[in-house]
Image (cartoon, helix red, strand yellow):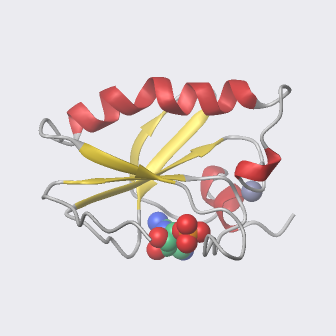
Amino acid sequence: MDCLFCKIIAGEIPSAKVYENEWIYAFRDIAPQAPVHVLIVPKTHICCADGITADNSLYVAKIFEAIPAIAKAEGLANGYRIVNNCGEDGCQTVKHLHFHLMGGQKLTEKMA
Ligand code: 5GP
Ligand code: ZN
């Protein structure tokens, strides 16, 4: 499958790894929109939030279980934002489910 994030997970495309376990991979966004901007992805191909099911939701749970530790390691003691873009209207550009973890400064109140 021609998926950028599947290739990153497989190590075929280099990335700056932040965290990894059996289910998930976290790496720095190539075009950060905040001082800390990490992408967290499941190690299985799920297209988007619309593709989350009872069969694969463990991966999503593992992402959210890891977020406090990733945020702590990144120094986000003052808070952070988690974003998921889904589909055309959500401006999703990479069609492999991912959550943006952003922080390191006071973020804009505007979200849409
Ligand atoms: P989306 O717009 O789909 O929610 O987010 C995709 C994100 O992937 C963007 O923030 C973009 O900067 C990031 N991105 C795109 N290509 C690469 C890449 O090759 N490496 C890394 N580390 N991030 C990428
Ligand atoms: Zn993929």
Viewer-side residue, 49 vs 95: 49
Q: Is residue 4 above or below residue 74?
A: below
> Is 45 left, or right, of 111 in this rendering?
right
Residue 109 position in % (x across, y down): 25, 63
Residue 60 position in % (x across, y down): 63, 33
Residue beneath the point at 23% across and 67% down: 108
State which image quarter holds ligand 2: bottom right
Residue 71 position in % (x across, y down): 28, 37
Residue beneath the point at 65% across and 60% down: 5
Q: Is residue 31 above or below residue 13?
A: below
Residue beneath the point at 21% across and 61% down: 107
Which picture quadrant has residue 2? bottom right
> Is 18 left, or right, of 23 in this rendering?
left
Q: Is residue 57 above or below residue 86?
A: above
- All told, the count of numbered labels is 0
Viewer-side residue, 86 vs 63: 86
Which quarter of the rendering shows the C terminus?
bottom left
Which picture quadrant has residue 30? bottom left
Residue 67 position in % (x across, y down): 39, 33
Residue beneath the point at 68% across and 67% down: 4
